[in-house]
Image (cartoon, rainbow, N blue to C red):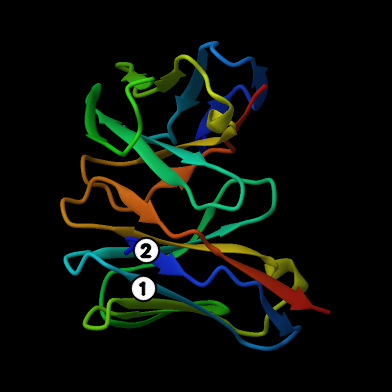
Amino acid sequence: QKEVEQNSGPLSVPEGAIASLNCTYSDRGSQSFFWYRQYSGKSPELIMFIYSNGDKEDGRFTAQLNKASQYVSLLIRDSQPSDSATYLCAVKGTGGFKTIFGAGTRLFVKA
Amino acid sequence: DAGVTQSPTHLIKTRGQQVTLRCSPKSGHDTVSWYQQALGQGPQFIFQYYEEEERQRGNFPDRFSGHQFPNYSSELNVNALLLGDSALYLCASSLGQIGNTIYFGEGSWLTVV
């Protein structure tokens, strides 16, 4: 079982729709959860982080965390073609030193 | 506010050679982590340096080594290069021994031929 699992996609949504990206993790003791966006040929950039169960909103982005189900998601409202990228879910596990990444989900937003 | 800087940006090496990649952390950060990202994969943790010591290491062979300097900058060294070492090498910095959020540099693209 991979430590952080994501559907590789591609996920294709029309412009203006809501994109929903999902992630599960194996370490039940994990405390910190992150979403990064990576454009082709570029390095990952932080979108947002979440530590507590529930929802956290930042502009068009909402992160959702359910520790009981070991599940993290990212919703992108009013998706734009510029949102087309690979989205990486990351988890800081028990012990707290390293951040572990999933393989990423490719998102395409069609104009 | 200076972000994470890495050098060189791109490089090509021959199998069996050695390479050194360099990283300066974001201003105010003292912890450096190195990742390897192969095409189509997520970043894989190589190791983390804090207070000039390797604090944690991922599943990488001893050919991968590193160093952190008193000014918090860091180097990643890879010996006896293999074709499979071709990847994007990412440096990430954070604050504190268990600082939560890591920020990436632009990366160093290594091609081994």
- Point out which mark residue A24 bears: 1
Percent position of residue A92, x then y: 28, 56
The N terminus of chain A sits in image quarter: bottom left
Percent position of residue A47, x then y: 51, 63
Subunit of mark 2?
Answer: A
Kindly state the secondary structure of the residue where label 1 is placed. Answer: strand
Horizontal arrangement in the rendering, residue B71 relative to residue A89 (left or right): left
The residue at the far bottom in this view is: A17
The disc, 1 or 2, on the residue closer to the chain's N-terminal end is 2
**Which residue does the image show at 21% across and 82% down from the upper left?**
A68
How many dots with numbers?
Answer: 2
In the rendered structure, which amino acid carries the disc numbered 2?
Val
Subunit of mark 1?
Answer: A
Q: Which residue is mark 2?
A: A4
Depth order, front residue of B22/B99: B22
Residue B8 seen: yes
Percent position of residue A84, x then y: 70, 67
**Which residue does the image show at 38% across and 20% down from the upper left?**
B63
Depth order, front residue of A34/B79: B79
Q: Are marks 1 and 2 in contact (CB under 8 Å)?
A: yes
Percent position of residue B87, x then y: 58, 36
The C terminus of chain A sits in image quarter: bottom right
**Which residue does the image show at 73% across and 76% down from the upper left?**
A109
**Is the residue marked by circle 1 packed among few (<14), some (14-19), or many (20+) residues within 10 Å?**
many
- Relative to A44, residue A80 above or below: below
Residue B29 seen: no
Distance from Cα at disc 1 to Cα at disc 2: 6 Å
- Relative to A25, residue B16 above or below: above
Quadrant in the rendering for residue B50: top left
**Is the residue marked by circle 2 packed among few (<14), some (14-19), or many (20+) residues within 10 Å?**
many
